[in-house]
């Protein structure tokens, strides 16, 4: 362990001013925290306490935004019968996963941050914190994959695509939680991998710094591939296909309109239905890009800790990506649900003071549900 390198020295100068020389952030911690903490984090001086307070305030803010946004999603979709469609079942599952992520993470961290320099809840609750953060995060990620598949099935496959029924949607939802457990439960049970305090020692995550090759690098590679690479590849594939289909279809329509010397081949009704469909696809693509930006920093930290030069990982540097990951649970309801035209119409009726101003669809317009949507005609 290098305690004289430039990164360590710079961090010590910046953060060590707040405590006597030679003080380490693990000094004075309860015995169970000392035993659980990877050796790498024990070498650093205590961080400026203002960082913990700042993160706690940010967590509280994210908690409120998360619960308002996801709570509204669950309330509107479950309250409104016309919105209880297979596609929207997936959106509700995403809201549930995001809602419980912050419900299980924020209170424990906020109390710990304001009352101590370390995680105060002991070994079991450290495992609980890490497990619930992992399972809700992975469940949300794979729900996004199924939402992407649904959009791909509707827009790209069109009439040839298999319609998603409520039974299929329910099966997808069950699978998201089974899949999340496949990667989270081994560490919770400590049969492969484990959860431990990380960074500034006020939160817990899976131990990518574990010196044991089986519990450290191998488990890190396992969860990186299953919880990051696989969903990212699927999402990129689905939305790349969607964008290509839209471009090809629009190009074909414009070319045909040019040959017929007309401005557009669409009727107003078709244009509105098509606009709603494309609107949902566009915001979903935006969410995928946000997902990559939000989760990639933490994936990089884990890979560096397991396989790279871990000396560049300071407590603050490792803590920031963990906080950034939580913001995904706040963006999802905004991008997936609040941008949903029919959701906005119902929200406008129920909460007019939100000033949504969403125009109601014509009664003859098709539903944007995957089982009823008017899809892109296949361009020849």
Image (cartoon, rainbow, N blue to C red):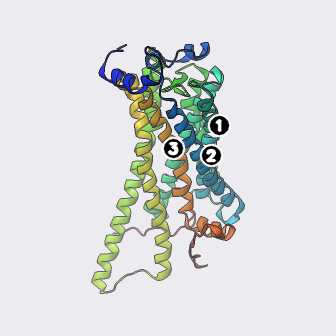
Specify whether residue 324 is in view: yes
Label 3 sits on a secondary structure element that is helix
Which quadrant: the N terminus? top left
Residue appearing at x 57%, y 41% in the figure: 57
- How crowded is the residue under tag 2: few (<14 C-alpha within 10 Å), some, or many (20+)? many
Residue 161 in the image: state x and y as whole percent: 49, 59
- Image height of 267 relative to 285, above or below: below
Residue 30 in the image: state x and y as whole percent: 61, 15
Residue appearing at x 43%, y 33% in the figure: 225
Q: CA distance from mark 2 to mark 1?
A: 13 Å
Q: CA distance from mark 3 to mark 2?
A: 14 Å
- Image height of 163 relative to 259, above or below: above
Q: Nearer the viewer, residue 265 or 184?
A: 184
**Residue highlighted by disc 1:** 107
Among numbered discs 2 and 1, the one appearing first in the sequence: 2
Is residue 136 rendered to the left or right of residue 233?
right
Residue 143 in the image: state x and y as whole percent: 54, 47
Mark 3 in CB contact with mark 1 (< 8 angstroms):
no
Label 2 sits on a secondary structure element that is helix
Q: Nearer the viewer, residue 323 or 347?
A: 323
**Residue highlighted by disc 3:** 141
**Residue highlighted by disc 2:** 99
Which quadrant: the C terminus? bottom left
Q: CA distance from mark 3 to mark 1?
A: 23 Å
- Image height of 116 relative to 377, above or below: above
Mark 2 in CB contact with mark 1 (< 8 angstroms):
no
Question: Closer to us: mark 2 or mark 1?
Answer: 1
Label 1 sits on a secondary structure element that is helix
Is residue 262 rendered to the left or right of residue 36?
left
């Amino acid at each position: 362990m290098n305690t004289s390198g430039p990164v360590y020295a710079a961090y010590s100068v910046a953060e060590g001013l707040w405590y006597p020389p030679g003080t380490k952030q693990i000094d004075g911690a309860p015995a169970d925290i000392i035993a659980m903490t990877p050796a790498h984090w024990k070498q650093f001086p205590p961080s400026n306490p203002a960082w913990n307070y700042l993160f706690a305030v940010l967590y509280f803010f994210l908690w409120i935004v998360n619960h308002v946004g996801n709570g509204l999603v669950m309330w509107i979709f479950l309250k409104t019968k016309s919105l209880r469609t297979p596609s929207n079942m997936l959106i509700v599952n995403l809201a549930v996963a995001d809602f419980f992520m912050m419900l299980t993470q924020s209170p424990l961290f906020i109390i710990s941050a304001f009352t101590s320099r370390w995680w105060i809840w002991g070994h079991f609750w450290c495992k609980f914190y890490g497990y619930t953060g992992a399972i809700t995060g992975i469940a949300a990620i794979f729900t996004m994959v199924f939402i992407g598949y649904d959009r791909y099935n509707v827009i790209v496959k069109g009439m040839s695509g298999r319609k998603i029924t409520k039974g299929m949607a329910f099966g997808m939802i069950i699978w998201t939680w089974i899949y999340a457990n496949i990667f989270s439960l081994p560490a919770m049970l400590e049969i492969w991998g484990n959860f431990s305090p990380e960074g500034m020692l006020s939160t817990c995550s899976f131990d990518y710094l574990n010196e044991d090759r089986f519990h450290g690098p191998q488990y890190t590679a396992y969860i990186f591939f299953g919880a990051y690479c696989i969903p990212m590849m699927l999402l990129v594939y689905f939305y790349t296909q969607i964008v290509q289909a839209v471009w090809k279809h629009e190009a074909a329509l414009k070319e045909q309109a040019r040959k017929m010397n007309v401005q557009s081949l669409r009727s107003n009704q078709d244009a509105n239905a098509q606009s709603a469909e494309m609107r949902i696809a566009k915001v979903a693509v935006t969410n995928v890009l946000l997902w990559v930006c939000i989760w990639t920093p933490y994936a990089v930290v884990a890979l560096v800790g397991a396989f790279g030069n871990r000396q560049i990982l300071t407590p603050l540097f490792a803590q920031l990506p963990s906080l950034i990951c939580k913001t995904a649970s706040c963006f999802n309801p905004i991008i997936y649900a609040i941008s949903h035209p029919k959701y906005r119409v119902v929200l406008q009726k129920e909460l007019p003071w939100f000033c949504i101003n969403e125009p109601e669809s014509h009664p003859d317009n098709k539903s944007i549900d995957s089982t009823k949507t008017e899809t892109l005609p296949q361009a020849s």
